[in-house]
């Protein structure tokens, strides 16, 4: 495999615990309808591409007997976190690049990717790699957030920040809503472009439940993800102004407390020729 010279991810990754608060708790939920869509079978070899802290890999192992589940992610802190929490000998995690997967051709029965491809600049190359390591007839599948039309919790932050900071936060919002594979039809078109057969698409739905504003806001003052990176770049007064504005949007005329927001993801699957 040719070494990757360009960046293979635009996601800012520092700490596994921080990722858990930001997205891991939601990928744990989304893994369930995703596996309902893509299917599982006993004894299969399954690869989780961009596994993060491992929730999709763990969900596959819980659903199936024997077999082998491998998880790869470019972020070493996430792999370390997944290894610490893994108690299943069938699961193995390693640092790996979605654009240069460290496996031979035709190594897996299913190659899956959850909430990753929209952060991969060379997304067609990553999809080609997923197809390469899948055996003939194997399933290749992915899901990404519908960030523009179905990701309410994310829009609360992005839209509020863009009003306060049209230049920088506005530009970040535009990048967020136009990431590859997040708009209608993009995943399906990419799967067909890659030559996959029996391509099918679906929309997956979960709800993001927060205990209160502190639970919602905490990840934005953390270390991981593009929005936390933006918050860290602000002067203290601007950061406080943003927090208060986002809090007003979260409260939405009510007392602080639990909130539940819908979150939709695009999903696609196909078979290797």
Image (cartoon, rainbow, N blue to C red):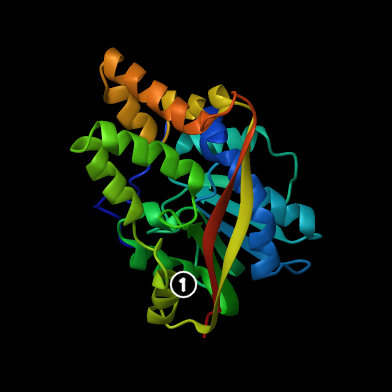
> Quick one: 65 or 59, which is closer to the camera?
59
Identify the residue at horizontal 47%, vertical 72% (top origin).
131
Image spot of residue 209 (x, y percent): 64, 38
Q: Is residue 130 above or below residue 230?
A: below
Q: Is residue 70 left or right of residue 168?
A: right
Q: Residue at x 27, y 31 (%)?
A: 164
Indicate the position of residue 90 as horizontal and vertical percent values. 72, 51
> Is 60 rendered above or below residue 153?
below
* Whole-percent x, y for residue 113 in the image: 52, 59
| Residue located at (60% from left, 76% from top) | 138
The reply to whether residue 56 is visible in this rendering is: no
Coordinates of residue 192 in the picture (x, y in percent): 42, 81
Quadrant assignment for the N terminus: bottom left
Q: Classify residue 179 by image quadrant.
A: bottom left
Would you name the residue on which mark 1 appears? 132
- Give the vertical position of 116 relative to 247 (above or below): below
Residue 70, compared with residue 218, is above or below; it is below
Q: Residue furthest front?
A: 253
Q: Estimate how packed mark 1 is, as few (under 14), some (14 to 19) or many (20 or more) residues with alpha carbons within 10 Å.
A: many
Asked which secondary structure carries label 1, the reply is helix
């Amino acid at each position: 495999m040719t070494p990757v010279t360009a960046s293979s991810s635009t996601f800012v990754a520092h700490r596994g615990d921080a990722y858990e608060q930001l997205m891991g708790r939601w990928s744990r939920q989304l893994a369930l309808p995703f596996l309902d869509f893509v299917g599982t079978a006993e004894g299969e070899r399954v690869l989780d591409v961009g596994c993060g802290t491992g929730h999709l890999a763990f969900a596959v192992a819980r659903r199936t007997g024997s077999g082998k589940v491998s998880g790869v992610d470019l972020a070493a802190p996430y792999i370390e976190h997944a290894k610490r929490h893994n108690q299943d000998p069938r699961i193995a995690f390693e640092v790996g690049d979605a654009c240069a997967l460290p496996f031979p051709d035709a190594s897996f029965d299913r190659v899956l990717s959850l909430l990753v491809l929209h952060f991969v600049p060379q997304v067609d190359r990553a999809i080609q790699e997923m197809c390469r390591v899948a055996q003939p007839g194997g399933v290749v599948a992915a899901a990404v957030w519908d960030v523009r039309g179905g990701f309410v919790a994310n829009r609360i932050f992005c839209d509020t920040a863009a009003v306060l900071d049209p230049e920088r936060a506005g530009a970040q919002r535009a990048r967020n809503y136009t990431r590859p594979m997040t708009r209608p039809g993009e995943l399906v078109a990419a799967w067909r472009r890659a030559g996959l057969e029996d391509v099918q698409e679906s929309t997956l739905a979960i709800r993001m439940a927060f205990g209160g504003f502190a639970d919602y806001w905490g990840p934005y003052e953390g270390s991981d993800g593009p929005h936390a990176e933006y918050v860290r770049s602000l002067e203290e007064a601007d950061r406080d102004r943003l927090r208060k504005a986002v809090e007003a949007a979260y409260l939405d005329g009510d007392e602080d407390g639990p909130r539940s927001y819908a979150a939709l993801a695009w999903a696609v699957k196909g078979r290797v020729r």
